[in-house]
Image: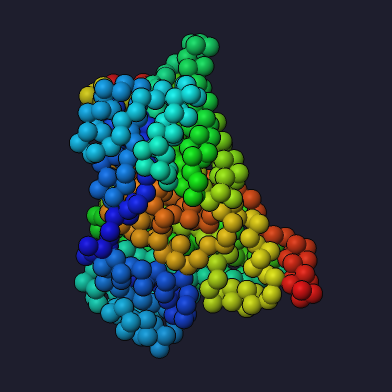
Amino acid sequence: MGRLEGKRALIVGAAGRGNMGQAIARRFALEGASIAVAGRHLDVLEEVAAEIGGVAIHGDMTEQASIAAMAAEAEAALGGIDVAVNATGWGLLKPFLETTQEELDRMYALQLRGPFQLFQALIPRMGEGAAIIQISSATATILFHDHYAYMATKAGTDHLVRALANEFGERGIRINSISPGVTETPMTAEAASVPGMMEAFVSGYPLGRIGTKEDIAAACVFVASDECFMTGQNLQVNGGLTLRRNPNKQEIEAAVIRAAAA
Amino acid sequence: MGRLEGKVAIILGASDERSMGAATARRFAQEGARLVLAARRKEAVDAIAGSLGALAVRCDITSEAEIAALAKAAVDRYGRLDAAVNYAGISVSESILDSTPEALKASCDVHFVGTVLFMKHMALAMKDGGSIITTSSLTVLAQAPGYAAYAGAKGGADVAVRIAANELGERNIRVNSIAPGFTKSAMTEDHFAVEAVTRAFLKEIPLGRFATVDDVAEVALWLASDEAFVTGQRIDVTAGQSLRRVPLASEFA
């Protein structure tokens, strides 16, 4: 018997082949949940939905109307929502002094306003025993160069998670966030394809390897299940990265140069 | 297939059926772990170990020799050690103005010195990676009057947990603590009998009910399993109480 048997789960941010949302959706399906996958690319969502026997729903986290429609559609398709995971994000790397208003607005819309409005759309539809999981980032706690807009909005949303846990606990709704470190996903694919790049990160991990999207999916199973009586928490699921740090710009450059020379 | 199939686990602090240690032992056994249970009172451990087919060992966490012997007992009996959970604790409560060296040292001996030496000997016995879990407290996260000795030592142990995680990662050993809130157990049953106390606490718990020893056991299970790429963390099982506060004694009326 699966650990999420009988749970109806909405996974937002599953429209990228091989992304974290898809890994979570696949694992949740294995654990017996019924699944709605959501995101901006319906064709990709339909592939993964067909694979796991779920439903595909269009949703754009930067548009309130789209978020509301997505939540309503998921509720109708699944017959209710017990678990929701927001795995959307935009891994912008941009020096602080060069970050534009357009980039800031887009980041805010996707990583702070979007989750805010997603929680607004979800909470009235949820009841006793429901769980919301926000995928945050280790960089909401530790730092990474040129990641200012990303880090600030992820950290802001973590604090919102705490406040909502405090507010809606009495309705039996648990809200937590999970912070991966750098993870190989489509969001990081371009950077990860540079030889030496990912190796530069490894020394930041006490456990000696960077995390995988499957590590995050495993943590999501625990937090989403009835086994978990936690709320308002930000869980660091990154092999101890926050005990150390990410590589700085110079260390990354040196690693890339070393890899190119080898 | 159980989530701890093939694993050998030590649980220290399993001397009462109502304890976190016993709840964790039951949960771990269900998931296929082979167990070594320990506490100061060996005959009390025997009773719990018997029904679970576990090995019972006497261990006082203030004795390094007994901690080392506990780790050795697991390896001698089962050939390996994969997970070790420390729930050993003593109740210490005195205000700053009433502080005594005796109580401060007693708390440090159990909660700080004992915890660090527990991590040491469990890690030495783990030859193939593993997971070490120790117990923190809500009182580390929210300032509870009267808990300087208790929370101070537990908070120090949490810092040691982070350092241990940083050091032991290269051996593939994960080290974390669990911070329960006010949880009904053998240690707290007297407090739970006072309705004014439970009422004052419930007001500070967002999820509206007390966490149980079984809730704590689930977190220990997750951390002990291969499903937690987590190290150096304090996992909060306070049902959200750390977002609020610990009530004052003046509210227990």
Image-based side of A180 in relation to B12, left or right? right
Where, quadrant-wise, is the C terminus of chain A in this rendering?
bottom right
Q: Is A47 above or below relative to A168? A: below
Q: Which residue is drawn at 44% across and 50% down?
A: A233
Image-based side of A23 in relation to A156, left or right? left
Q: Is A102 above or below relative to A221? A: below
Image-based side of B212 in relation to A248, left or right? left
**Where residue A219 sits: x, y (%)?**
41, 58
Q: Which residue is drawn at 50% across and 66% down?
A: A212
**Where residue A89 sits: x, y (%)?**
52, 70
Q: Which residue is drawn at 40% across and 48% down?
A: B224
Colour convention: rainbow
**Where residue B199 sits: x, y (%)?**
27, 31
**Where residue A10 sits: x, y (%)?**
34, 70
Q: Which of B124 and A132 is in front in this view?
A: B124
Figure quadrant of residue A51 = bottom left
Q: Which of A151 and B59 is in front in this view?
A: B59
In this rendering, does residue A146 appear at all? yes
In this rendering, does residue A144 appear at all? no
Where, quadrant-wise, is the N terminus of chain A in this rendering?
bottom left
Q: Is B140 above or below relative to A159? A: above
Q: Nearer the viewer, residue B17 or B94?
A: B17
Q: Is B58 above or below relative to A123? A: above
